[in-house]
Amino acid sequence: MSDQLTSPIATPEDYAECRRVMFGASKNYTFASRLLPGRVLRHVEALYALLRVGDDRVDVSHQGFATAGMAIADWERAYWQAFETGRSDHPVLRAYLDTARACGIPAELMVPYFRAMKEDLAITRFPTFADLYHYMEGSAIVVGRAMTYILGVRPPYTVEQTLPHADSLSVAMQLSNFWRDIGQDWRIGRVYIP
């Protein structure tokens, strides 16, 4: 095995940056993270930060880029470059790359996430549940699947056997989130209820 694959990719400071991103963005996740075993907490923080940075580039600020589309495209390019080279200049990407390697998360897992982020720039209504489900494949389902790898699966089960259950739980949680945020989403011009 090459030195690149066996040596640590991320530093404690990289994971601390992920924690800062999560603590700054979500009281709910921060509170819930207290219940996680220490061995997985930093990996959950890295996952959260990876997704939050991209989501913020679409929804909050695309500072440094002419458009939000350019900002999320840059984040996607940086993501793939990190996986191709085994390194990154961005602390969140270093931490997530380290997490992905430690937990066996395939790089391709985030393909639907980047698709959904780009769709968020143009799609503001979901006429059918199938349309909404397609969107959730890139939001909640990606999170549930990544969490399955991070939390692990006990024998005799395999990750592949548990992913459909993770998908169902993720969809249920995402729908609850959409229902909770109907007013807030409406104010920014989005309707996630078919």
Image (cartoon, rainbow, N blue to C red):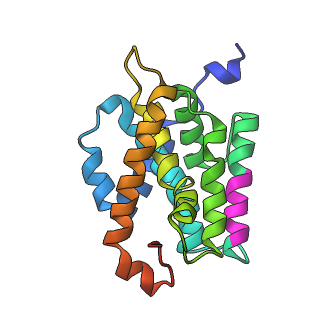
Magenta segment: 69-77
In the image, residue 14 above or below residue 61: above
Q: Give 106 or 12, whichever is nearer the viewer.
A: 106
Q: Is residue 72 magenta-colored? A: yes
In-image side of 116 versus 185 (left or right):
right
Residue 19 in picture, x, y percent from top left: 40, 49
> For the N terminus, which image quadrant?
top right
Q: Quadrant of residue 39?
A: top left
Residue 50 in picture, x, y percent from top left: 54, 51
Q: Give 116 or 133, whichever is nearer the viewer.
A: 133
Q: Main secondary structure of the magenta part?
A: helix
Q: Is residue 41 visible?
A: yes
Total numbered labels placed on residues in the image? 0
Residue 88 in picture, x, y percent from top left: 68, 43
In-image side of 122 versus 189 (left or right):
right
In the image, residue 40 above or below residue 194: above
Residue 165 in picture, x, y percent from top left: 41, 38
Q: Identify the residue shown where x is 40% and y is 58%.
A: 174
